[in-house]
Amino acid sequence: MSLIRGFAVAITMAKPMNRTGTVQTCRHIKRWVSPTLRELAHRVQKQGPQKPEPRAGFIEWNYRSELFAFGKRLNEEFQLPLLQTAFTERTYAHQEQERQRKLGIAESDLHTADNVELAAKGAHIAKAYIEAYVQHSLPKVPAIGQKAITSYLLSTETLAHVSTHLGTKDLIFASEYPPSNETLANTLNAVIGALADSSGVERAFLFVRDFICTQLNQKDLLDIWTPEQPLQLLGEVCAQRKLGDPEPRLLGDCGKNTVLSAFHVGIYSNRQLLGKGFGEDVKTATETAAIDALQTLFDLHDNRRPFDFGIQLETKHVRLEA
């Protein structure tokens, strides 16, 4: 399709101009334009879609300038050698050393730094801060729920999503292109490690908060963590908080003997309504009501107070053990 686009631009630029310098509109298109465009489109379709190519192969590519611009876009100060190391995967480093060895370079000079150590450090920093942030933002959620939310933020898919939208895809030195989700996630961890070595751990904590923790914004937390046995968990929570045993009660039903049956169940504790839910049978409605009650007790409803993404957790609140 790029051939067709370039051909169309050439036709536009070839339009005659009048004395004032403006382009004169042609009343008629030459009869050879249509068959030429059809032939070009046929050739492109026959060859198949063009494979994605890294921007590093472009003539005007300046890698050092791109690294500098990457840090400025994020409003962070990186040491460029560290940042370049963060973007270098181990597989690429091994390929580069093998290429240099074939060129006859001495073994003592065969050294290409990779991002393994930076990625491990960045992953450790991200895990420590996210655990502290989730615990601070969701204090009523039990440990199993906090762990599930932390695992979501640290998952390969989430980190790859963040890494892609930060513009790391074309800066990565890897053996494959486009880079896989694992490579994108590993690179993001390495960038966090490089930032910690360049500007300090505090800046790395803020980076994790601004770009990873914000993935919880407008997110339904039940999509991340749904209790497997909500009624049993509700009983344990009520016992811990001394609320009394939860009691499911049928509030209403409709069409119980039809395929469109619906049951309305409420769960009470000490004569206080904790939650209610609907379902096609009593068991489903009871589980739905139990989940609704847990949302109330854990403060997970959609109308809950939004996450505070401007908070600055003190270093002492973040467990950053080696």
Image (cartoon, grey):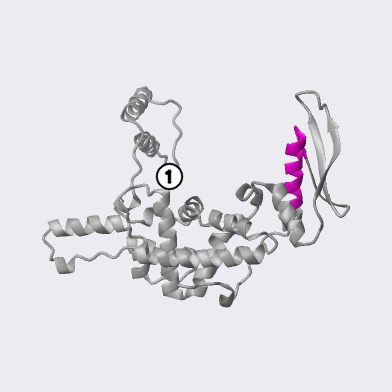
Residue 57 on image: x %, y %: 29, 51
Q: Nearer the viewer, residue 166 or 65?
A: 166
Tell me which residue sits at (66%, 59%) in the image.
142
17 vs 81, nearest the viewer: 81
Q: Quadrant of residue 43?
A: top left
Highlighted range, magenta: 278-295
Residue 20 against residue 24 in the figure, above or below: below
Magenta stretch: dominant secondary structure:
helix
- Give the residue number, with chain letter if any, for mark 1: 21
Q: Is residue 287 magenta?
A: yes
Residue drawn where x is 54% and y is 69% of the image: 206
Q: How many marks?
A: 1
**Residue 270 on image: x %, y %:** 86, 55
- Residue 295 visible in rendering: no
Residue, x 66% and y 64% (percent of image)?
137
Instruction: Give the answer, above or below, for where 29 lies relative to 237.
Output: above
Quick one: which residue is furthest to the left in this view?
104
Q: Is residue 166 above or below residue 121?
A: above
Which residue shows up at 67% across the image and 47% down it?
229
Could you tell me the amino acid type at mark 1?
Gly
Quick check: 76 left or right of 133?
left
x and y, in percent, of residue 157 in the image: 49, 50
Evaluate whether residue 39 shows in this view.
Answer: yes
Quadrant hosting residue 86: bottom left
